[in-house]
Amino acid sequence: MNNNSSRNKIIGVFNVIFLGLTATCAIIGVIIAFWAVQQYKRNNNAQMINTLLGSDTEIYKLMIDKPYLQGILALPPKDRNYKSIANQMLEIITYDKNDNICVEWKDIPELYEIMFGLKDFNNNNKQKLREVYFIAETILFDILTAFEAKNYNLINEEDYETYTGYFSEIGNNPIFLCAVYWSHKNGYITKRFAQDLKKKLLANPKRKSAIEVLYPDLLKGDWIDRGGEVQQKILSYANDVAGERR
């Protein structure tokens, strides 16, 4: 009886020790897993920031090589005539006040059609404006990338806000607004980014006033939901063709 009692006590002690070791191992395992996840996030964060910084670096290299590209960063004059300001921004890039491209457009969609339309496509001034357009589009897609990276916790809110700072610099630039227009029209930007983009662009009263003149469509209530109009039309046409073939 005494032997059984002693054995049970020993077994009980070992069980307690085993459970303690098991619990300790589990805690250590959780700590290691947590550390691994945090390290993974830090690595992804660093990789994403390096990617975004790399794109910024390439943009500024281009601007150094071709100074007229710096026109997209030009500070607008303090004037309430936003169409006149927009034309001056275009003239800074082309260095040509006599070119009709700086006066013959009425809104952002029409300016885009002028820059990329077949008429006088090889015009030197149009080529310069298109070069700046691709800079603007790259900046827009960098902001989009930062926005989506934030949503997937690859970068934090503060990192994202450094990229939305571009809106303060070029948010009312007609060529940047062309990039917004075309990317939205073709569905190159996500719906949730379009919502954030619109909110931030219109947050500044002066910028909002400029957009009211240059790109009034952006202020409409259904602008966000109308993203990807071109893709929708292509898909609709494809479905119609497929239906006829059946």
Image: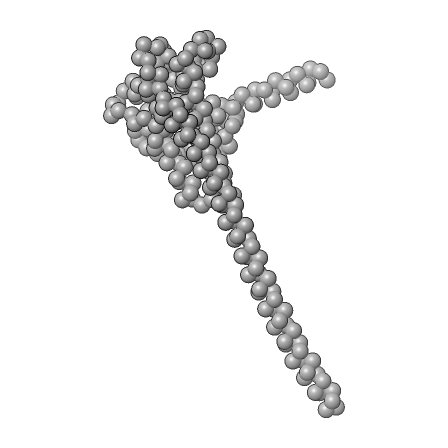
Residue at (38% x, 33% y) in the render: 166
Q: Is residue 37 above or below residue 85?
A: below
Quadrant where the N terminus sits is bottom right
| Quadrant location, the C terminus | top right
Q: Horizontal placement of 145 versus 91: left or right?
A: right
Q: Residue at x 57, y 57 (%)?
A: 33
Q: Is residue 127 above or below residue 1?
A: above
How far across and down, in percent of the image, does residue 104 sit? 36, 11
User: Foreground: 16 or 40?
Assistant: 40
Residue at 35%, 10% (x, y): give it.
99
Colouring convention used in this rendered image of the protein:
one colour
From where the camera sits, is residue 133 visible?
Answer: yes
Query: Which of these two is toward me, 130 or 108?
Result: 130
Q: Nearer the viewer, residue 82 or 49?
A: 49
Q: Quadrant of residue 176?
A: top left
Question: As drawn, which residue projects farthest toward the front?
Answer: 65
Whole-percent x and y of residue 230? 54, 21
Residue at the image position 24 percent from the left and 25 percent from the top:
78
Q: Is residue 154 left or right of residue 234?
A: left
Residue 108 location, x and y as percent?
40, 19
Given the current orientation, which residue lies at the most extreme left position?
78
- Residue furthest toward the bottom? 2
Left or right of 94 in this view: 11: right
Q: How many marks?
A: 0
Q: Nearer the viewer, residue 50 or 211?
A: 50
Q: Is residue 219 visible?
A: no
